[in-house]
Image (spheres, grey):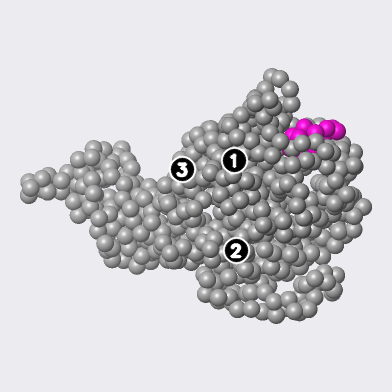
Amino acid sequence: MRGAVWRRALTGLLLTLAWSGPGWAQPEIVWEVENPFRFFLDPADTEVHRATWVSLSPEQRKSPVLSAERVLAERHADGWGASMFDKTCWEGTRNRYTCRERPDYINPKSHMVRASLQGLADAQTVDCTWLTAPRGRGGRGKAVTLPCDTPVQLEIPYPAGAWIKVEIGGLQVAEVAARVTDLFIVGMGDSFASGEGNPDVPVRFSPDRTAEYGVGGNKVPLDGYPARVGDWKTIGEKAFIEENARWLDQACHRSLYSHQLRAALQLSVEDPHRAVTFVGVACSGAETVFGIFLRYKGHEWVPNPPEYSQISAVAEAQCSGRNAPDYELPEAYHINGRIPELKGGLVLKKCDADRARKIDLLLLSIGGNDIGFARLVANAVLSDGSVLRRLGGWFGHVHGFAEAGSQLDQLDDRLKAVNRAAHFLLHVPWSESDRVILTGYPPMALLEDGNSACPDGRAGMTVLPDFFLSEAKAREGNVAAERLHAVMQDSAKQHRWTLVDSHRSAFRGRGICVGHTDAPWTQADEMRLPRKIEGVWQPYSPADWQPYASRQRWFRTPNDAFMTGNFHVSQSLLQNVMKAQGFSWVQLLLASVYSGAFHPTAEGQAAIADAVVEKARGVLAKYDARRRAADPPGPRLVQ
């Protein structure tokens, strides 16, 4: 035993002497954060995404999130999110970003890193002793001795960092200053930010049984529809509802496929010395007033809906759950009475500046619901004689460009109020306004030439007889969308925000009407809804549906939404809402429209995330250069 120890020590001495001669490369320490996306509790989940990123070719890395989504979709037919969404630092029962396994989630005190020694010949025959010491001070830390070819796990203090040192036979052979950059990235906004249309666990369908929804407005029987798996007897009963799609946040239909989360995840895995602490509060249906400033209970009924507005929820997170105080703000945000809903008695949470974690990036997607996105879509896709149009769309209103125009005139004031809140309430410095990243909306119905709209027809919309896409109304909607983007451009320039819009051109030719309606048939781009006719499924069995397969269109059609989200409500709730019997077709409406129709697919979300990442890199690089200039590495370890 003693002889082996002496041999290893002698080997270390000889190696050290050899390295001092000409022509020999000095071994170096290579390290990386073990779990850079801290939102995932299990480092193995983050490693799936990091390994996918590493495997991408140089060409694929030009759009890394989209490329990764396609790679992962090939491996996971039902989507990669199903195995990860319930192991995060989001506690849905409490509506908080926290976790018992990681009590310092918002304000980490340290990070675990993996380190290895590179460039050492015969590393398997030599033992290495690893030491750490705080930056700026000498002394030895806790020693860990392992064969030199074995990676070591070390705890590095945050934010100061530490020196990592390697000794062989008592002689130092390498050292490196290790400091983790931990970014606090916050996501706020609406359904385009929440990931609507892409549940973490999509609904699964039976290959045999069917579902019936009564009679439609045109007296056509609504039967032969795909039916969920599960031990249920009647649509809407408890056993049926238990088979609903599952979301990271059920009320807000927020999922891991959100482009805000995907952008934060990508930023975490592409830099080995970076970690990301992510807080996303985007909610399907939210707008600037009801959502950003005022409490909004979400898209789906749950027993514990969101407790705060998005601003207050972020402020609470900034305080690490230490109860951010309430502030009454009677004047600052209604913009001289032009936003009357915010006038009088507005109370929001604000974490005191000395306690609040500073936001590195504030990702924002807002404005669509402020001008009536759902109403514009209803105007474009509901036939003139439909019952739904007479009822006012999907339980709201139907309006066109003229009505949207009046609301567009108010959007600038609303975004001005959001800007004030970002600085005064969430502590984004005025001099660093470009940390606020506003994402533009992709065109939903533009063909590849960038001018033509989707033609008249029911492609992708056969789930309900009331649906019929009007080219003229779709073109009108595109005009409203372009004006919306112009307002967002002007506001971003005025407030010195970073605007993301490079993805908008990528969506041309990938809109809601793109796919196959006739032979030759491919399931990924199929636009028809499977129906069982005379005992035979046409055009395919619903059990074969792959919600996250790569496809040409990047928007969910109503047919896609039925097959992916399939949102239904309980029998009692439906009866309470409708106040009458005989409205089974309403479940069909919910199962298509309220399941994410007219929203980006996971591929679409990934394409948006790539555009966000590109802009975010530039913002972060600027501030990182300033930090490095102000904070040099410090003295080396005392040997």
Q: Which residue is denoted by mark 3 in the rendering?
A: 48
- Give percent across and percent down for residue 573: 68, 57
Q: Nearer the viewer, mark 1 or mark 3?
A: 1
Residue on which the image places disc 1: 228
Q: Residue furthest left?
A: 2
- Looking at the rendered structure, the kind of residue marked 2 is Pro
Is tag 2's residue or tag 3's residue first in the polypeptide sequence?
3
User: Contact (CB < 8 A) between labels 2 and 3?
Assistant: no
Residue 406 seen by the camera: yes
Q: Residues within 10 Å of mark 2 (few under 14, many from 20)?
A: few
Distance (Cα) linking label 2 and label 3: 33 Å
Q: Which amino acid type corresponds to the residue marked 1 in the rendered image?
A: Arg
Q: Which mark is residue 303?
A: 2
Q: Does residue 562 appear left or right of residue 80 in this picture? A: right
Q: Earlier in the sequence, mark 1 or mark 2?
A: 1
What is the magenta range? 454-465
Q: Nearer the viewer, mark 2 or mark 3?
A: 2
Under circle 3, the secondary element is helix
Label 1 Cα crowd, 10 Å radius (few <14 / some 14-19 / many 20+):
many
N-terminal label among 1 and 3: 3
